[in-house]
Image (spheres, rainbow, N blue to C red):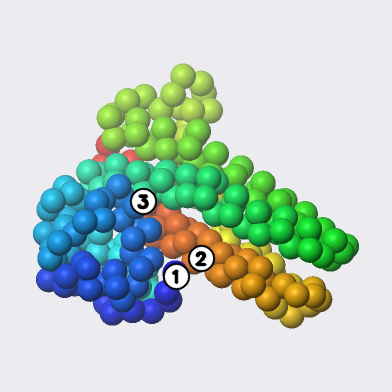
């Protein structure tokens, strides 16, 4: 379902045509809690209907089509709420949809091929996703509440650590959680011999690619959009 390159999306384009070209845009819309019934709406009309910044949506949508954000962004503090909503919903997607899906494929593979190699891959994936969940939970528990307080001009928190918290600390804590997925794909494509597994192997690799693609977008949004915007809001306070 993922795609690495599509047309550069502009406000006057019809969203339905763009979705047919790249169905991954449905995932973007889901993360933004937008209705999938788009009729003949253009991107501009869709954004107006959903009260979402046109510039922010275009940055996100073009990321899904393979275009990196530019350094010159005219985003405002109002956009921060939308960005956090997107990120929180993507967390839910990773934890409650993609991880169980991929884990179930590995379990099926294990049932068919009870080998040491498959057990190691299962362990590798579980340990990897444990790291992912720690990253997501940190953002949900620490970073996002701070960003919300910043928007409301509330104190940073009750403890000394919370009072000193800033986007700089978030940036230091931020890690690229998607890179280890490539190791899993390498193992499945090049090294692990398994009999009669073409269907399952294809499903696993496809799901890993989908997860990796969305995690890449997730990280890019945090690093090139979220962090600069929060830093700007902090300096404007």
Q: Say left or right for 34 vs 197.
A: left
> Going by the picture, which residue comes out furthest to the right?
116
Q: Position of residue 187 (x, y in %)?
A: 74, 72
Q: Is residue 78 visible?
A: yes
Q: Position of residue 136 (x, y in %)?
A: 53, 44
Q: Quick check: 88 above or below 7?
A: above
Callouts 3 and 2 close, C-beta under 8 Å:
no
On residue 2, the disc is: 1
Mark 1 residue element: loop
> Nearer the N terminus, badge 3 or badge 1?
1
Mark 2 residue element: helix
- The CA span between labels 1 and 2 is 6 Å
Q: Residue at x 52, y 23 (%)?
A: 160
Q: Residue at x 38, y 66 (%)?
A: 24
Query: What residue does disc 2 label?
Result: 210
Callouts 1 and 2 close, C-beta under 8 Å:
yes
Query: What residue does disc 3 label?
Result: 31
Write down the quadrant of residue 122 in the picture.
bottom right
Q: Quick check: 191 above or below 96?
A: below
Depth check: give the residue in front, 167 or 48.
48
For disc 3, the neighbor class at 10 Å (few under 14, some 14 to 19, many from 20) is many
> Going by the picture, which residue comes out furthest to the top?
158
Q: Residue at x 45, y 57 (%)?
A: 218
Q: Position of residue 157 (x, y in %)?
A: 44, 24
């Amino acid at each position: 379902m993922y795609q690495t390159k599509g047309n550069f999306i502009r406000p006057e384009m019809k969203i339905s045509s763009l979705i047919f070209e790249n169905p991954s845009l449905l995932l973007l819309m889901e993360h933004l809690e937008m209705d999938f019934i788009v009729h003949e709406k253009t991107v501009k009309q869709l954004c107006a209907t959903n009260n979402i910044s046109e510039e922010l949506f275009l940055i996100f949508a073009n990321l899904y089509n393979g275009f990196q954000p530019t350094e010159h962004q005219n985003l405002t503090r109002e956009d921060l709420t939308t960005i956090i909503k997107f990120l929180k919903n993507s967390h839910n997607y990773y934890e409650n949809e993609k991880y169980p899906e991929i884990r179930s494929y590995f379990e099926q593979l294990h049932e068919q091929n009870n080998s040491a190699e498959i057990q190691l891959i299962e362990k590798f994936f579980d340990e990897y996703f444990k790291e992912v969940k720690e990253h997501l939970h940190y953002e949900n528990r620490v970073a996002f509440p701070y960003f919300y307080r910043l928007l409301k001009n509330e104190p940073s928190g009750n403890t000394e650590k919370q009072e000193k918290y800033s986007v700089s600390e978030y940036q230091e804590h931020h890690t690229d959680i998607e890179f280890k997925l490539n190791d899993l794909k390498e193992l499945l494509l090049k090294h692990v011999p398994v009999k009669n597994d073409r269907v399952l192997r294809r499903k696993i690799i496809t799901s890993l690619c989908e997860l990796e693609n969305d995690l890449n977008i997730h990280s890019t949004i945090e690093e090139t959009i979220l962090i600069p915007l929060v830093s700007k809001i902090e300096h404007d306070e």
